[in-house]
Structures are given as structure tokens and as C-alpha cells.
Image: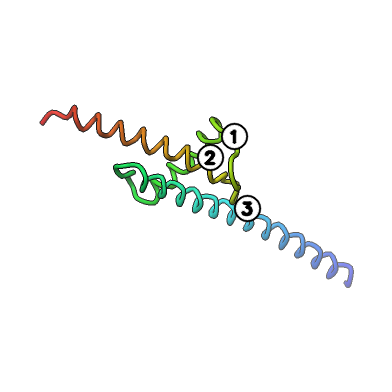
């Protein structure tokens, strides 16, 4: 009987470690999305025009900007929750600027 109890305690500890690992991964993803959103929001504030969908658009601009910035420049600056801040900011600026140019160009072509 004590062997079964010890086995159950060991299995419970393994499950608890697995749960902590999963929660830690989810928390890391959430924090990465928040940092990407902040980077995208700052880039949106610098570039004239607005990125649509508020903070979700800023998160998307931050994520795409991170990918673009790292592809073009490599990892520059401090890395916070797997987001290199300087590379992500420059990439998000490029994304926001291209979006701004496209929306201005499309607004000029509208026929009413």
C-alpha cells in the first residue's frame, strides 16, 4: 500500500511539473505578444496614419515587424521575451509605413 501511495505522489509531481511547464510556455507567448503590441503601437505613433484594429493591429505589426527587422538587420538591441527591441521597432516602422502608403494610394483611387 505505501508503494502505491509513493507512486501516486511521484505521478502527481510529474503532472505538476508538466503543468507548470505548459503554463510557463503560455505565459511566455502572452508576454511576447504584449511586447510586440507595444513595439507596434510605438511604431504606429511615429508613422502618420493609423493601423486598423487597435491593439490587435499593433500586435500584428509588431510580430511582422519583428520578423522583417530580424531578417533585414539581425538581432539588434536588447531581447525582451524573444523580441529584439531595436530590430522589431525598425521592422514595425517599415510595416506601418508601407501600410500607410498603401491606404493613401487606395484612398486616392476610390470612385464614388
Looking at the picture, how far across and down is residue 4, in whole percent? 85, 67
Residue nearer the viewer, 101 or 52:
101
Task: Residue 2: give its label.
Answer: none
Q: Earlier in the sequence, mark 1 or mark 2?
A: 1
Per the image, label 2 sits on a secondary structure element best described as helix
- What is the CA distance from the residue labelled 1 to the residue labelled 2? 7 Å
In the image, 5: left or right of 112? right
Q: Please indicate whether residue 56 sits to the left or right of residue 29 in the image.
A: left
SS for callout 3: helix
Q: Residue 25's mark?
A: 3
Label located before the other in sequence (1 or 3): 3
Q: How many residues crowd around disc 1 within 10 Å: few (fewer than 14), some, or many (20 or more)?
A: some
Q: Which residue is mark 2?
A: 87
Instruction: Tell me what residue is drawn at x 56 percent, y 33 percent.
Output: 73
Looking at this view, is 16 or 62 the one in front?
62
Q: Residue at x 53, y 54 (%)?
A: 30
Q: Nearer the viewer, residue 24 or 87?
A: 87
Residue behind mark 1: 74
On the image, the x and y values in percent for residue 65 come to 47, 38
**Whole-percent x, y for residue 9 in the image:** 80, 68
Mark 1 secondary-structure assignment: loop
Give the residue at the far bottom of this rendering: 2
Amino acid at each position: 500500500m505505501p508503494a502505491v501511495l509513493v507512486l501516486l505522489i511521484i505521478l502527481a509531481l510529474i503532472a505538476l511539473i508538466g503543468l507548470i511547464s505548459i503554463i510557463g510556455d503560455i505565459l511566455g507567448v502572452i508576454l511576447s505578444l504584449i511586447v510586440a503590441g507595444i513595439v507596434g503601437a510605438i511604431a504606429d505613433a511615429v508613422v502618420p496614419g493609423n493601423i486598423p484594429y487597435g491593439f490587435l493591429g499593433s500586435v500584428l505589426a509588431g510580430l511582422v515587424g519583428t520578423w522583417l527587422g530580424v531578417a533585414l538587420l539581425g538581432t539588434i538591441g536588447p531581447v525582451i521575451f524573444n523580441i529584439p527591441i531595436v530590430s522589431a521597432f525598425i521592422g514595425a516602422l517599415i510595416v506601418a509605413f508601407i501600410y500607410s502608403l498603401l491606404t493613401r494610394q487606395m484612398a486616392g483611387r476610390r470612385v464614388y
